[in-house]
Structure formats: structure tokens, C-alpha cells
Image (cartoon, rainbow, N blue to C red):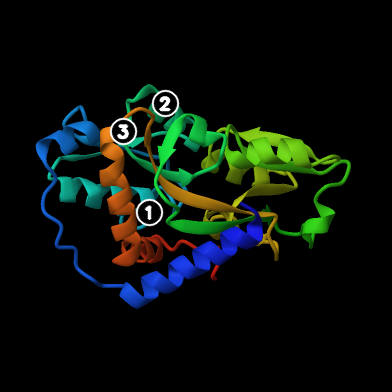
Amino acid sequence: MNVQNVLMFVLAMTMTVAAQDGRISTAAPAAPDVRQAVAPSGKLRVGVYPGSPTSMVRDRTTGDVKGLTYELGKEFARRLNIPFEPVEFTQIADVLEAIKRGTVDFTVTNASPARAQDVDFSAPILGVELGYLVPRGSSISTLAEIDRPGIHVGVTAGGSSHATLSRELKHATVVPSPSVAAAIEMLAGGKVDAYATNKAILFEMSDQSPGSHVLEGRWGIEVFAIGIPKGRDAAMSAVRKFAEEARSEGLVKRAADRAGLRGTVDD
């Protein structure tokens, strides 16, 4: 699916949410066999990592936890009438590995073709632009200035941007970071000239990096969907149904708004 098609899809999805936001679900509780298929441990183990509004963020003043994955996982567990168990990892690569092993039951992430080899996905629920964050005083002002000799671009190790930019950047050097927190330090310390990931994370990083800013424009779009371990075919109908309800009832939009998620394709 090219960028234009993705954009058209998510714009149409957003219009549906706006039209139907606030509708209350009247779905009956899930049958025991569905609950067992979705959460074989008896708890819905939801894979999250800190620093991304699409996953989990903590309010630096109150300590309250928000985030798209966190809130949708909690609501899905409530509708299934099973305990909600957030499982925190350092980065998305660790969450995906846990999904692959079957030690996590649910997450929300970029539904790339590469990830679909190890994760079963629902229909898309959200689109987020990909971009670059540059530090205070940077001479870089446009996307076109990124791919040059001597430019070091930070990425999250094992993430989609790591794989994509390692192929597409011909002159700049890609520098992996183990976490969002480490990425902020790398940018502040001059170890990288720019940081690349989805804009939901970039704006969150910018809030913690005085003088930094997200460059105008985008180099791609990430399409987010609910992901579960491969082979749980009996669980997929419940996951697909919940993904559709999360869009149509406005759950996705409200969770995104509470988490301060910016950079969606309709922003």
C-alpha cells in the first residue's frame, strides 16, 4: 500500500470515528473459549514500552499512565472480563519478540509486512507520520538535508525506522538507540544530528529536549494495528471485532487525545 492510499484510508477512518464517537458498545461478555484463545494465561498480557504515546507514557507530575496500547489493552480486557496485565519492555523490538514467543497476548504497533511474518494483525486503527527531530541550534532545516555525508541519524534499535533507513539513506550514518530515553541523551549530547521515528514519539522527545524541533514534512507513514501472537486463530475474530469497535466508538481517538498523541495523518 503506497503512502497516498494509506493516507486516504486513515482519513476515511478518522471521518468514521468523528461521526460515531461516543457510541456505547452493547456487546455481550466473551465466551470462555474466546477468553482462553485470546489470553491463555488467564490474564491479558499487554506489551508496552515507555516514551511513546502509541504505547505508554507516564505523566511526569502525577505518574498517571496513558497511551494507546495501554488504554486499548485495558478496555479489551474489561470487555473480555479478564484481568489486565501490562508488561513493560524497553523498546518495541522487545515487545515483538515477546509476542513471537507467546509471552505477551496483545499490543498495538506499526503493522509492517516484515512484522506480519511473526504477528497477526487486525485492520489498521491509526496512521502516524514518520519524521525527524533535530536539536537546538541544528543547521538542518529540511528533510532534504538529512541524507548527507557526516550526518548521523538516530533510530530505535530493531524498529521499523532502523530497517527502512538503513536501506534508504545512502550517505548519512544510521545509529541505533536502545530506548527513547537513551535517544534523548544521544540527541542532547551531540552523538546524533537527527532522530528518526514516528512523530508521536518525536513530539514527546521534543517536549523533553528544550530547543529541539520536529522538521516539517514526512518521509513515510506508519499504520498501526492490534497485534497478537501467530497461530491464535480462534482469537482473531474477537480482536478484529474489538479493533472495529475501538474505531467506530471513538476509543482510539480518545486514548490518543489523552496521551497527547501528535503527528497523525490528519493533524
CA–CA distance in space, label 1 to label 2: 21 Å
Query: From the viewer's perspective, is the residue at label 2 or at label 3 nearer?
Result: 3
Residue sitting at 26 percent across and 34 percent down? 234
Is 238 on the left or on the right of 15, as rendered?
Answer: left
| In front: label 3 or label 1 | 3
**Residue carrying label 1:** 68
**Do callouts 3 and 1 mark residues in contact (Cβ within 8 Å)?**
no
The amino acid type found where label 3 is placed reads: Asp
Can you give x and y, in whole percent of width and height, for residue 214 in the image?
65, 61
Q: Position of residue 35 (x, y in %)?
A: 17, 37
Residue drawn at the location 36% of the way across and 77% of the way down: 19
Mark 1 or mark 2: name the one nearer the start of the chain.
Answer: 1
Q: Is residue 149 left or right of residue 254?
A: right
Task: Name the kind of residue labelled 1 in the image.
Answer: Leu
Crowd rating for badge 1 (residues with CA inside 10 Å; few <14, some 14–19, many 20+): many
Residue 165 in view here: yes
Q: Nearer the N terminus, badge 3 or badge 1?
A: 1
Helix, strand or loop at label 3? It is: helix
Compared with 78, 217 (above or below) is below
Q: Which residue is mark 3?
A: 233
Residue 216, image quadrant: bottom right
